[in-house]
Image (tube, rainbow, N blue to C red):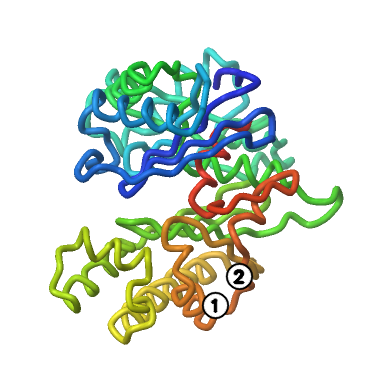
């Protein structure tokens, strides 16, 4: 990854909204959250770089944000992420071998992808030649978080930023943004690494990011997002889903506490419980006790209450993941934009 500028604009391009965070070191200077035009994002990809660039440029101008360099959080569904273990090797050797780790996942031409990695750990093998990972060679092994991203994705992102007067200096998956925030808040030296479940209540899907310390374990995706609430509200009021979404965010006529929404919350929390139980079954040594809630759905208090009553976890606000005691009114929407700026 390229070194970060001292002041950088974090950009999170979501289905429902665009989030910007101007960050200097670990100080958040300015933020902005604006609605995303309909159908400008499809399957995590920008449909029109020109329109997106104009949206970013206008949002920066209206919020007094001045910056020349940007870091972008890439949507999970647009990239491939793998945890791999390999023998200790040089950077050139890594660059040559890394694409082979994705041969069972990428059906397109490998030349159409960019590959990058972050070193998670380097460890020695045991005397019998067996280590923590999958590598067969004797000697040290390194655990990597490897990423493959389509070149076209990076180019369309770069083009949109260029139209906004920004230079793309970093593009990384969402999980890297959360990982950076966990590293930034850190823990006291000598303590057992804490387990984190970051629950992103997104518009089209809900994602549970599981970490042990700053080590990403797994991401569970529920194909059930806040748009499911728009649907039930639209049916109740006989309006289109776009107006229903406004009703939801503004709690029109206390719709967030109506039976149809409460039933929808129940469906969501049951699916969350299933995902949590599967994680615990797959990781019997897990002692997960805490969950941090973020994303657009985090502002829906009855949904938070339903989650708290159903999951046997301590509920935390998104702001508790921000370093240096940062307090922001809409912190639950800005975690990715802030975290992606951090090394």
Residue count near mark 2 (Cα–Cα under 10 Å), binned few <14, some 14–19, many ≥20: some
Q: Could you tell me if the residues under marks 2 and 1 are in contact, i.e. CB atoms within 8 Å?
A: yes
x%, y% of residue 218? 49, 53
x%, y% of residue 231? 21, 69
Label 1: element kind: helix
Q: Which mark is first along the chain, 1 or 2? A: 1
The residue shown at (40%, 36%) is: 74
Task: Say which quadrant the C terminus sits in.
Answer: top right
Task: Say which quadrant the N terminus sits in.
Answer: top right
Left or right of 110: which side holds 219?
Answer: right
Location of mark 1 (residue): 308
Count of number-bearing discs? 2
Q: Of 187 and 260, which appears nearest the observer?
A: 260
x%, y% of residue 277? 49, 74
Label 2: element kind: strand
* Mark number displayed over residue 315: 2
x%, y% of residue 126? 72, 42
Q: Of 28 and 218, which appears nearest the observer?
A: 28
The residue shown at (59%, 53%) is: 211
């Amino acid at each position: 990854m390229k070194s970060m500028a001292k002041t950088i604009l974090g950009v999170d391009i979501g289905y429902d909204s665009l989030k910007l965070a101007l960050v200097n070191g670990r100080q958040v200077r300015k933020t902005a959250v604006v609605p995303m035009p309909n159908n400008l994002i499809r399957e995590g990809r920008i449909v029109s770089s020109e329109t997106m660039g104009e949206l970013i440029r206008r949002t920066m101008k209206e919020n007094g944000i001045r910056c020349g360099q940007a870091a972008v959080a890439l949507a999970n569904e647009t990239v491939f992420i793998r945890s791999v273990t390999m023998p200790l090797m040089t950077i050139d050797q890594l660059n040559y071998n890394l694409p082979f780790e994705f041969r069972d996942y990428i059906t397109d031409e490998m030349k159409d992808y960019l590959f990058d990695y972050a070193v998670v750990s380097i460890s020695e093998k045991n005397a019998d030649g067996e280590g923590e990972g999958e590598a067969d060679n004797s000697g040290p092994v390194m655990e990597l978080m490897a990423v493959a991203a389509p070149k076209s994705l990076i180019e369309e992102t770069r083009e949109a930023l260029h139209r906004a007067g920004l230079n793309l200096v970093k593009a990384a998956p969402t999980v890297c943004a959360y990982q950076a925030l966990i590293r930034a808040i850190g823990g006291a030296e000598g303590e057992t690494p804490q387990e984190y479940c970051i629950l992103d209540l997104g518009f089209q899907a809900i994602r549970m990011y599981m970490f042990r310390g700053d080590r990403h374990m797994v991401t569970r995706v529920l194909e059930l997002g806040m748009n499911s609430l728009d649907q039930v509200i639209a049916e109740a009021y006989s309006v289109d889903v776009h107006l229903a979404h406004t009703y939801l965010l503004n709690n029109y006529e206390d719709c967030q506490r109506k039976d149809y929404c409460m039933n929808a919350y129940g469906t969501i929390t049951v699916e969350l419980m299933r995902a949590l139980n599967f994680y615990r079954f797959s990781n019997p040594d897990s002692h997960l006790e805490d969950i941090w809630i973020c994303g657009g759905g985090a502002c829906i208090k009855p949904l938070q209450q339903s989650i708290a009553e159903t999951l046997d976890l301590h509920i935390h606000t998104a702001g508790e993941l921000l370093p240096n005691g940062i307090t922001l009114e809409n912190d639950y929407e800005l975690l990715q934009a802030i975290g992606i700026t951090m090394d």
